[in-house]
Amino acid sequence: MVKPDPAQVRERLLKGLRCQRMRDVGLFTGDGESDPDCNSHGEEVTANFVQNIKGMVEDGSLGPKALFMAEDLFIRQQIESLQAMFSQWMARAAAQVDGENIPFKEIIIWCQNCHDWEKRRALRIEARALCRFLAPFSHATWQALMSVVKEILGYEDYLEFCQKRRSTPLEKEYKRCQSILEEGRDQYFSEVESWLKRVYPGKSLEETTRFDAIYLLGMRYLDHLAGGGLRGDLALKFFESLGVGTGRGVQIHMDGTPGRQTYCVPVKVPGEIHVIVGPIRGWLDWEALFHEMGHAFSFLHTDLRRPVEEREFLTSGAVSETIAFLFQRLSLRREFLLYILGPGADGLVGFEELEQIHALKFEVLKRRYGAKFLIEYENFSKERISKGQELYADIMHRETGFSYDPETYLFDLMPDFYSLDYFNAFVASKILLKRLEQNYGPRWFLNPAALDHIRTCLTNESLDDVHGFMKQCLNRIKAH
Ligand SMILES: [Zn+2]
């Protein structure tokens, strides 16, 4: 057998990755635009091709990341048709509340806008029924993923597959997560309870569901504090001043509905980054724009001298998420709002409250993703993907205070332990922001030295290992 040329293999993988990402951009923007270069089926990643790469990694002619890239492309091809079927059924499903038709995919946006407590109870009942109906399609996709990993790629189980890519053992992450959640639990519960009572006097946390959490976290009831001053161009001007904009290859797609799911897709790192967001109606859309531009910031500062696999293929999203959350946190800090909205900004008193509520929102999210990771770890290690519903409902309630229906379990599962990346990034971004504010003051975002520190960390530190990244990065900031 002729041994494939490593440079050609690398080239083929990169092309596959770029095409996949271009397809994602088309899917997320809804314009379906695709690169004519990507339509040839000759580029498909076959099981044989993955096997060849495995051999090349073993003999040292390719690095382990080439295999991970190939496996990801292969898995995606294998489960694409099941996923498409699942999406089609989801697109047809809708809940009925008080004569209103709410498409399944728009339940989150609907909850963000629905102040009516009773209507959200009615939605819960509908959502449970829809999830029960859709669960077999989601389950089939998960099952297919598990069997590709075991039967074709030859891993012992999904846990081993994920573990191979991680720099820290998942078991260690599990214990760390557990202890962080344990530490902050009591304070968290009393703060969330009083947040709820400020919005719904007379209600208690025990009565709430995840749909109430979506409403609270959406913060639409505080949008009036912005006095109409939140404008996308202000945010983009700020990022331009940091060197993150169209001139550096960032393309902004701003369309769809406020509150929509937003994305940052790096088609080429660092040269072609797509940010897909909705129009800015309130805080939620504002912070989402900062989050995605934060990702763009992290990709743009990836050093071109790094080997291509290191730039284009990260085995963990936690470092990029940390930078995204850092800018998301910044976007609602009082000092930042006073700066960006100008001295005439309305609601100056309200900004204090807004800042506190936003910090609490991040605590809710940190606990939500921490809890999800605990559940995913338990369920994947015991291979009981279809039996994890009760555990899910128990742990989510215990850690967040909001009740979760067992039926929504499969719809909340994330592949590749991305929940862990989010959890770590929530924790890390809080520490990083605090350190920047301590060293450079609340207006650190105007200080070139502070921004240079973050850039230097992104250029020099490991982008696959958030713990190592944070350790080195905090040392650099301290050394200043
Ligand atoms: Zn993100």
Image (tube, helix red, strand yellow):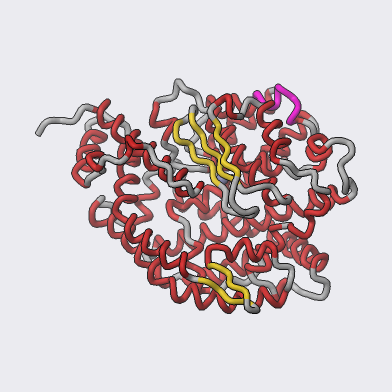
Q: Nearer the viewer, residue 302 or 460?
A: 302
**Which quadrant contains ligand 1?**
top right
Q: How many labels were placed on the picture?
A: 0
Query: Any magenta on residue 450?
Result: yes
Compared with 330, 185 (above or below) is below
Q: Nearer the viewer, residue 293 or 434?
A: 293
Q: Residue at the location (24% across, 37% down)?
A: 53
Q: Position of residue 181 (x, y in %)?
A: 62, 57
- Residue 131: horizontal and vertical position, in percent? 49, 72
In the image, taking residue 291 as reference, residue 158 lies left or right, namely left
Name the residue rendered at 88%, 48% in the picture: 347
- Vertical position of residue 366 compared to residue 463: above or below: below
Q: Is residue 268 visible?
A: yes
Q: Nearer the viewer, residue 412 or 428?
A: 412
Direction from residue 7 to residue 129 in the image, left or right: right
Per the rendered image, the range of residues in magenta is 445-452
Q: Quadrant of the C terminus?
A: top right
In the image, residue 318 above or below residue 411: above
Query: Is-magenta flag for residue 59?
Result: no
Question: Which residue is at the far top?
Answer: 305
Q: Is residue 122 visible?
A: no
Dominant secondary structure, magenta:
helix
